[in-house]
């Protein structure tokens, strides 16, 4: 016969939660039996899911590639936001498991807190407070809420195997979708499945990066830059697994995933994407194989120098940046115009900026902007993540932003050098590569659009999970 104590919860929070839920379910049932029954079934599913905390995280990773938004109470919400809300609603259940890790605020939370506080402070000077607060809430979601939710993850050997399979399977699906879009003349697999893309309505669709204008793959992102940013960030994990696989067979799967992602990147035809991918590969070589990494680095420098000489002496290069970058010169010249305007906005509001994400509002309130390729509607960002932060949050927020990236990169490099030789170490390497790719791509585009920060925060959080030194029952350092 079982001891009575085995039938009772051993923690007071469990008792309180059970009491509150029981009362609410009883109340709902009296008002509507169907709603009550549905609520009971829903909570039952939640309890089943909380046995594996990697399930909501897997849903989140899949949702990164579907950034279509709906507006709820004036706030744009996409699939990733919905997963975060559901995960947050069941977070206490995850933390009450017997196998739940001891809660502690993640490193990323503390690293990002000054940036988020600066973003809230910028509300006092925002040109468009309503638009700015939406961006501040997203910033809070990315760098504060998500790391706390991921504190419920238990980094066991089974968990890491699950993560390896997840990152090797999901990104190639969207790469294949992008390639099929080109081969089918704009009709992608996701389009045939009824998945919409976040593009303007037809009367406002005069925008250069959609397939119907440029012929470049966009997949579910609706634009080549979105697909390219997604693939580049995911390449950091795939490449790290390829370099440091748990088994030789996993390296074969990682190699196939790499090829498929580069195929998708090729059809996206993003120069910033190839620049970010090059950064990932260079960082991976420098940290995993320093001898070969430095050879490739110096070979790249020599190649760039020879290319410049060839352009100057044989192609009559005029010495301008526009003439240096091949293809779509108007995209380069327009970026220079936007960057110049961004510097002007920053110099006029150097301390706290104009409000996070309010560069657009300042420009159109102060006479607009004339570009070589007009968008056809009032949509504008800095096309540079650093300038977007600088104009929105001023030098105070910009310093906090660079500090967040710098301290995360510094700690991950330190952990990588002190690694213990176990296969979760590949996620530490992936975190280094992801930050490098992010910082490189951020020089030529504004990554606060789409879901890139969800990806960055997730990979960094996984990297810090891989640095934990406790030993679990399965004998793996987690």
Image: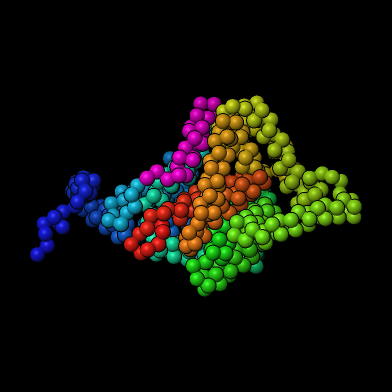
Pinpoint residue 443: horizontal percent, then vertical percent. Answer: 66, 45
Which corner quadrant of the image does residue 396 belong to?
top right
Instruction: Tell me the quarter of the image containing the N terminus.
Output: bottom left
Direction from residue 140 to residue 188 in the image, left or right: right
Can residue 55 be seen here? The reply is no
Question: Residue at point 49% right, 67% down?
Answer: 246
Direction from residue 76 to residue 230 in the image, left or right: right
Pinpoint residue 319: horizontal percent, then vertical percent. Answer: 84, 45
From which residue to which does the magenta span run?
104-126
- The correct choice, above or below, for 213 with respect to 334 in the image is below
Can residue 470 be seen here? The reply is yes
Q: Nearer the viewer, residue 263 or 237?
A: 237
- The correct choice, above or below, for 385 with respect to 2 in the image is above
Q: Nearer the viewer, residue 411 or 86?
A: 411
Direction from residue 223 to residue 39 in the image, left or right: left
Q: Is residue 110 highlighted in magenta?
A: yes
Q: Is residue 428 highlighted in magenta?
A: no
């Amino acid at each position: 016969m079982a001891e009575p104590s085995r039938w009772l919860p051993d923690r007071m929070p469990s008792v309180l939660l059970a009491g509150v839920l029981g009362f609410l379910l009883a109340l709902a049932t009296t008002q509507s039996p169907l709603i009550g029954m549905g609520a009971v079934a829903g909570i039952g599913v939640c309890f089943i899911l909380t046995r594996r905390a990697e399930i909501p995280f897997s849903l989140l990773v899949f949702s990164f590639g579907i950034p279509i938004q709906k507006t709820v109470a004036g706030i744009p919400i996409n699939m990733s936001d919905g997963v975060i809300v559901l995960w947050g609603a069941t977070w206490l259940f995850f933390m009450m498991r017997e196998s739940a890790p001891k809660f502690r605020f993640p490193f990323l939370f503390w690293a990002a807190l000054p940036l988020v506080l600066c973003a809230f402070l910028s509300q006092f000077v925002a040109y468009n407070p309503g638009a700015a607060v939406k961006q501040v809430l997203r910033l809070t979601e990315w760098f504060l809420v998500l790391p706390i939710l991921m504190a419920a993850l238990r980094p066991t050997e089974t968990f890491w195997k699950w993560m390896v399979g997840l990152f090797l399977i999901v990104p190639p699906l969207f790469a294949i979708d992008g390639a099929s879009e080109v081969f089918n003349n704009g009709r992608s697999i996701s389009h045939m499945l009824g998945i919409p893309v976040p593009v303007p309505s037809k009367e406002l669709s005069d925008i250069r990066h959609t397939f119907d204008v440029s012929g470049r793959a966009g997949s579910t992102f609706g634009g080549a830059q979105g697909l390219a940013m997604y693939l580049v960030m995911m390449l950091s994990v795939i490449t790290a697994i390829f370099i440091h696989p748990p088994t030789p067979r996993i390296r074969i799967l990682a190699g196939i995933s790499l090829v498929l992602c580069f195929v998708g990147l090729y059809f996206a035809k993003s120069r910033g994407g190839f620049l970010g991918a090059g950064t990932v590969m260079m960082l991976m070589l420098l940290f995993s194989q320093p001898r070969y990494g430095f050879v490739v680095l110096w070979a790249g420098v020599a190649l760039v120098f020879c290319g410049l000489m060839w352009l100057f002496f044989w192609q009559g290069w005029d010495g301008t940046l526009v003439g240096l970058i091949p293809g779509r010169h108007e995209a380069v010249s327009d970026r220079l115009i936007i960057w110049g305007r961004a510097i002007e906005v920053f110099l006029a509001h150097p301390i706290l900026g104009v409000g996070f994400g309010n560069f657009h509002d300042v420009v159109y309130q102060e006479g607009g902007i004339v570009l070589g390729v007009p968008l056809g509607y009032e949509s504008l960002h800095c096309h540079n993540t650093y300038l977007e932060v600088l104009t929105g949050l001023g030098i105070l927020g910009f310093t906090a932003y660079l500090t967040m990236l710098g301290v995360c990169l510094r700690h991950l490099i330190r952990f990588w050098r002190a690694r213990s030789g176990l296969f979760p170490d590949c996620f530490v390497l992936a975190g280094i590569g992801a930050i490098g790719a992010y910082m490189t791509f951020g020089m030529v585009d504004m990554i606060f659009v789409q879901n890139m920060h969800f990806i960055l925060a997730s990979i960094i959080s996984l990297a810090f999970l891989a640095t934990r030194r406790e030993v679990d029952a399965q004998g793996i350092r987690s």
